[in-house]
Amino acid sequence: MARNKCFNREDALQKAMTAFWSQGYEATSIQDLVDCMGINRGSLYDTFGDKHSLFLAALDQYTETSVTRSSALQRDGNAKQILTEFLQAFMLRNIEDKDRRGCFITNTAIERSSHDEDCATRIRNYFSSVEKDLEQLIARGQAAGEIKTSRDSATLAAFFIGVMQGIRVVAKVNPTEEYLRPLVDVALASIDG
């Protein structure tokens, strides 16, 4: 007779994501996962497969939440103001990260992407999704005369992805507004001319 699972899959996945996010893939052992998730090894393997499959599920869960956050780029209004507010809020979230965990996606890109194609594909897809939202917002702002047209929207969108990733990495070692604000200001100056 099959046993019923005595845990909530989404809750366990959230706990695993937190462990991977805090420690990284390599430093997180199966025992760490069993302990933090509050389940036994058999349940972990039966529900999520191996460690790598669990990691990918955690990464998928994180990217879904992050893509939802980037949907703020799709709202109506002045495109330049929306981009400004988005980038400033992004900077502040990184400053307020007292544990300096950074971004799970960025951390994974650094740790895993060069040798884990499953991770690299997911991260490329995530960046592409956010970049598309940025490109559409910038193009809309250019058409309305709110954003200067000296650079095309695709180039500017790719540039902002790079700026955001830079902010995430730099904020892990220097999470102060005094240090990060100039990065935001210079990036925003790129849409003025």
Image: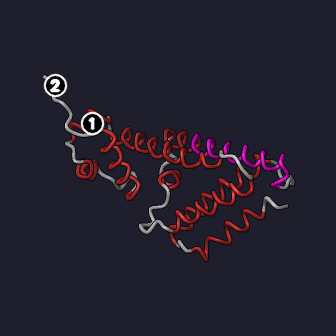
Q: Is residue 104 left or right of residue 52?
A: right
Q: Residue at x 81, y 55 (%)?
A: 147
Q: Which mark is residue 45?
A: 1
How crowded is the residue under tag 2: few (<14 C-alpha within 10 Å), some, or many (20+)? few
The residue lying toward the viewer, choosing from 168 and 110, is 168
Residue 141 lies in the magenta stretch:
yes
Q: Is residue 121 left or right of residue 18?
A: right
Residue 167 in which image quadrant: bottom right
State the image coordinates of residue 78 (x, y, percent, origin top left): 74, 53
State the image coordinates of residue 51 (x, y, percent, origin top left): 34, 42
Residue type at mark 2 is Ala
Discs 2/1, front: 2
Sequence-wise, the earlier of marks 2 and 1 is 2
Q: Secondary structure at mark 1?
A: helix
Residue type at mark 1 is Tyr
What segment carries the magenta color? 125-147
Quarter containing the C terminus: bottom right
State the image coordinates of residue 75 (x, y, percent, origin top left): 65, 46
Q: Which mark is residue 2?
A: 2
Name the residue at the front extreme: 77
Q: Mark 2 to mark 1: distance in Å? A: 15 Å
Q: Is residue 17 left or right of residue 172?
A: left
Q: Residue at x 16, y 25 (%)?
A: 2
Q: Is residue 172 above or below residue 32?
A: below
State the image coordinates of residue 55 (x, y, percent, origin top left): 39, 44
Q: Is residue 7 above or below residue 177?
A: above
Name the residue at the top extreme: 1
Quarter containing the N terminus: top left
Residue 42 lies in the magenta stretch:
no
